[in-house]
Image (cartoon, coloured by chain):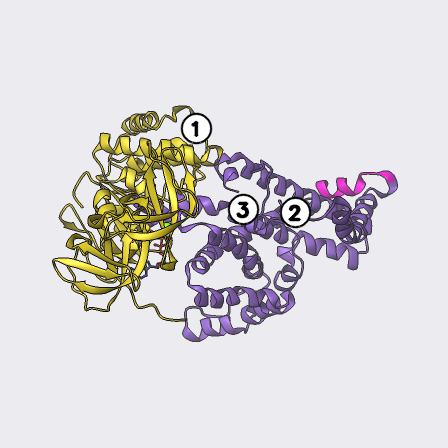
Amino acid sequence: MTAGEFVSLLGPSGSGKTTALTMIAGFETPSAGRITIGGQDVTFLAPNHRNIGMVFQKYALFPHLTIRQNIAFPLRMRGRMQKTAIARRVEEMLELVQLSEYAERYPNQLSGGQQQRVAVARALAFEPPVLLMDEPLGALDKKLREAMQFEIKRLQERLGATVVYVTHDQDEALTMSDRIAIMSDGRLMQFGTPTELYRQPRTEFVADFIGRMNFIDGDCLDCTAEQTVVRLSERTVLNLPSAANERTRRYNAGTALRLAIRPERMRLTKRGDGGADALPGIVDAAVFIGSTYIYLVRLADRPDASLQVQIAADGVTPFQKNDDVDIVLDGAAAHVFPVMERCAA
Amino acid sequence: MTRSLTLLPRSLSFRRPSSARFYSLTTSLALVTPLLAALMAGFLYPVARLVALSFSGGTLSHYRRIFTEPLHLEVLFSTIEVAFIVTVASLLLGFPVAYLMAQLGKGLAMAVTACVFIPLWTSVLIRSYAWVVLLQRNGIINTLLVDTGPTEGPLKLIYTQGAVILAMTHVLMPFMILPIYSTLRALPPDYVRAARNLGAGPVRAFVAVTLPLSLPGVFAGSVMCFVLALGFYITPALVGGPNSMLMATLIGQQTTVLLDWPFAAALSTVLLAVTLLFVLMFRRTLSLSKGLNSVY
Ligand SMILES: Nc1ncnc2c1ncn2[C@@H]1O[C@H](COP(=O)(O)OP(=O)(O)O)[C@@H](O)[C@H]1O
Ligand SMILES: [Mg+2]
């Protein structure tokens, strides 16, 4: 991570996001590896000497202290500031999060959103260069969450802080982050900008986790650096450009592969108009959601495989349920992954 | 969260019984009626009789006697003093134990909990006699002291106020440990982590966060210890001497030896009043600390 960056840790619950933050904050020691901040190895440094701000998942505001006392806490603990300087700084922080009127209240007298703002103010009061946030908006309703996302981002940019933000909400991660680290089962799956993750997922897990993705199983006929030919059924063979196999992995003929393609990277035509590499299908459902149509299309000769196709709604004549269609894939936007051996239960 | 106060920490209190949502009022009443009846018959009625008895003959003469004869006032004050010292000693010794129990892993915590509970399940009589055995003139402690040589002859350990305080602290300590333990146990580790993260060392985090947040348990334990100590009978009767008489012993003497029941009733009423007074004072203190009030 570089200084001033906003990085999200994104993953399903139980994937080790909190654990990762816990180690950065110093409450637990990693069994292997090092943690360095600004070039300094902090792996074994006590949490109180790390100078990292943290917003806890459940805020962890001290219930026996007023809002003012909560925000003053890190300043008092550091003991380097005069009483008047502390008071001034607390005032500033209260104004920053617009809670000046609530200074003398106790945390349980505040709403969830207000508590969240106090937690941020407390974590920022001592101007830490690094701020950790553990699903800080998880407990808030949708509307408040969106407002707070904006707020947090604005604060971060204003203060130039480096933020590690934990979330299991991909939209939140996509809108807020400079870069996202996708976690699964305690492992880092991929680390990149939102665009990279969306356009070039390196594993099936990432492809599935970010955005909507269709998967079709097939097997490899000819996979080289130049082209990827995937057989979906006896009659359907897809010839994709090499970009799809972006790790330019070579698979032996017959290897089970999984093809991934986003709903918006496909077109529908009347049956027969799709050209050589089109997949014949039958419309199972058509949904109009204003700006787009979403079709659920079953492959004609693979009734088990169903694809979601998203098409901009401007001017096209919609297809109906049970229409025979051809699906035209944007081959450059497709990905192939090896099918992982699944242990049969 | 209601503003009503309880002396017990949340885990021990019955303030918001969730079952009330499932049962109708009639069913609920039917369920508590036996208990209420038992309380009426076994507690309220005798207490009322006792208070009535203390005013027998329509005079305040028994009360006048208590407050004019220095002996009785002395016993009352020394009872309060002993109860106070026992409470403080239990707190000082019990808090670290409770803290340890809350910190330890499951297995070890069980072991320590057993060490706290097993004495509690042992009869008070046996525990008090154990102290007699330990403290008597040629008991283990005196033998050890004389043999290893720090003292010339055996010390007078038993039948002193010190012995009473020691034995009562031992007997009452579990009542201090358990509420504190349950409060500490219920405390999310995030608070201490937050304190450490915000720059507090381990000691300051304890003083600034753990300690204040454990106060409801401390109050609950203290009230229990103090109230139990005020009315303690067996232990002071066994290990205490004539110079370290407490209220309960005095009342016992009046009823069994001197057979002056009205006077004993007056003494009991005074003790009851003093106990209630202290409980109210404790509650008042707790309700004044607003922050704590908002915790539980
Ligand atoms: N890298 C890892 N090695 C071993 N255990 C891990 C690792 N990452 C997470 N865990 C374990 O997985 C569990 C869930 O992790 P947690 O960080 O709470 O997940 P999340 O916050 O993503 O929901 C924890 O019990 C943790 O000990
Ligand atoms: Mg978590």
Q: Which residues are magenta?
A: B58-69
Q: Does the rendering let one see residue A15?
A: yes
For the N terminus of chain B, which image quadrant?
A: top right
Q: Secondary structure at mark 2?
A: helix
Residue underneath mark 1: A104
Q: Is residue B8 left or right of residue A14?
A: right
Say whether mark 2 is within 8 Å of ligand 1: no
The mark closer to the camera, 1 or 3, is 1
Residue displayed at 71% across by 54% down: B250
Residue at mark 2 shares a chain with residue at mark 1: no
Q: Is residue B111 left or right of residue B234?
A: left
Chain at tag 1 = A
User: Between A331 and A135, which is closer to the camera in this rendering?
Assistant: A331
Looking at the image, is mark 2 or mark 3 earlier in the sequence?
2
Q: Do labels 1 and 3 touch, CB within 8 Å?
A: no
Q: Secondary structure at mark 1?
A: loop
Identity of the amino acid at label 1?
Glu
Say whether mark 1 is within 8 Å of ligand 2: no
Residue underneath mark 2: B76
| Chain letter for the purple part | B
* Residue B59, magenta (yes or no): yes
Residue underneath mark 3: B219
